[in-house]
Amino acid sequence: MRSLFLPIFIAAAMLGIAAPAGAVPVGAIVPATARGIITAPVSIVKTADLDFGLLSVTTAGTMVIDPNANSIVATGGVTQLGSLWHAAGFVGAAGGSSVVVLIKLTNQAVVLTRTGGTETMTVTSLTLQGQNKRALAAMESFSFRVGGTLNIAANQVEGTYLGTFDVQIQYP
């Protein structure tokens, strides 16, 4: 501590300024962390899964989630129970420069398999909210929803069905 204080005291004496006679207490040294996060030029994060909610089935039918209207419609012998359904949700951001992104969904049926079993259902006609091509300014965020059609058989076994689908973001 003296080696740090001494040069300051000498400099102050040379300038003709009075300096304190005693040493100044110095607090504890606390390390700090420097951090930076690097992301791809365009990044995307899922905020919600595609969830058709709780259903009652008497005969074959469908549940259709429209991501543009943010609505759900049952057809055939399917009845929606409650309001636990929602479209899949995504949010993304452009990096440090303007960019045009293209959002792509699979055009194949998504197979859902019953948890603890082998029974399946399919989700077809995945639908994107809004346009699939988006022009983004630097550091601009964007969000969108994805819906689809759940195809339910008349004798569908009761249970929770799970499956996955891909959302792809392309940019030049």
Image (tube, grey):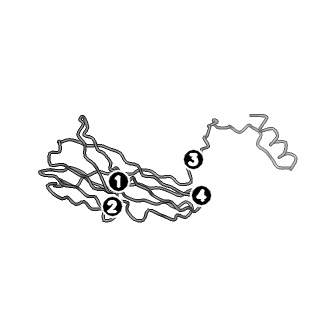
Q: CA distance from mark 3 to mark 4?
A: 13 Å
Q: Of the numbered discs in the image, which one, if any, rests on residue 128?
A: none
Label 3: how many residues lie within 10 Å, few (<14), some (14-19) or many (20+)? Answer: few
Q: Label 1 near label 2: C-beta < 8 Å?
A: yes
Query: Which quadrant of the structure image shows residue 11?
Result: top right
Q: Position of residue 117 (x, y in %)?
A: 23, 35
Question: Amino acid type of disc 4?
Answer: Gly
Residue sitting nearer the eye, 115 or 13? 115
Q: Of the numbered discs in the image, which one, if any, rests on residue 88?
A: 1
Label 4: how many residues lie within 10 Å, few (<14), some (14-19) or many (20+)? Answer: some
Circle nearer the N terminus (3, 2): 3
**Disc number lying in front (4 or 2):** 2
Left or right placement of residue 88 versus residue 39 in this view = left
Residue sitting nearer the eye, 15 or 82? 82
Determine which residue is flagged by label 2: 67
Q: CA distance from mark 1 to mark 4?
A: 27 Å
Question: Amino acid type of disc 2?
Answer: Pro
Secondary structure of residue under mark 1: strand
**Disc number lying in front (3 or 4):** 4
Q: Label 2 near label 3: C-beta < 8 Å?
A: no
Residue found at the far front of this picture: 108
